Image: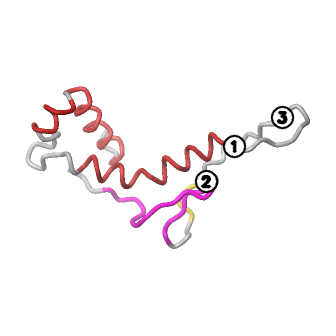
Amino acid sequence: MKEFKGTKGDWKAKGLIVLTDENKTICNCCLMTFLHDRRGQIVKDTQGEANAQLISASPELLEACMECIDPLTGLVYDGITKFIGNSAAYKIEQSIKKALGND
């Protein structure tokens, strides 16, 4: 199985920005569209902030998913599959492939 080659270390969301633990920008989740209320005031980009939150959690999510994989088969361990079901196990395997660029 491939290894994650992205930015190492802890990621955190700060508004629309995803930062490293050294405060270096990983990405900006600004949608480049501005929503306005009825008075013409710019509305907070809650969708962009939600995207930043999810992206900042992705290294831990990937790591947790990879711990479910049998290194010999590249598939979710049988015991885990029996507990969560084939569909969930398949989603874990496909998500890992997508995150590592194997999809």
Task: Residue 82 in the image: state x and y as whole percent.
Answer: 13, 31
Q: Looking at the image, which residue is at 47% across and 61% down?
A: 11
Q: Find out whether residue 60 is within the magenta segment.
A: no
Q: Residues within 10 Å of mark 2 (few under 14, many from 20)?
A: some
In the rendered image, residue 79, in percent from the top left (x then y), is placed at 10, 38
Foreground residue among 45 and 6: 45
The residue lying furthest to the bottom in this view is 22
Disc ID at residue 28 = 2
Image location (x, y in percent) of residue 84: 21, 32
Q: Pick the residue in front: 57 or 30.
A: 57
Residue 45's disc number: 1
Disc 2 and disc 3 in contact, CB within 8 angstroms: no
Query: What residue do we see at 32% from left, 56% from top?
Result: 4
Query: How far apart, in angstroms, are the residues tagged by discs 2 and 3?
Result: 23 Å
> How many neighbours does mark 1 have within 10 angstroms: few (below 14), some (14-19), or many (20 or more)?
some
Q: Secondary structure at mark 3?
A: loop
**Among numbered discs 2 and 3, the one appearing first in the sequence:** 2
Q: Contact, CB < 8 Å: mark 1 with mark 3?
A: no
Tell me the quarter of the picture where residue 46 sits: top right
The mark nearer the N terminus, 1 or 3, is: 3
46 with respect to 52 (left or right): right
In the image, the segment drawn in magenta is 4-21
For image coordinates 86% across by 41% down, the residue present is: 41
Q: Amino acid at mark 1?
A: Asp
60 relative position to 31: left or right: left
Q: How is the image coloured?
A: secondary structure
Spatial separation of the CA atoms under disc 1 and disc 3: 12 Å
Give the residue type at disc 3.
Asp
Under tag 1, what secondary structure? loop
Q: Tag 2: residue type?
A: Asn
Q: Position of residue 15 (x, y in %)?
A: 64, 54
Residue 9 in the magenta stretch? The answer is yes
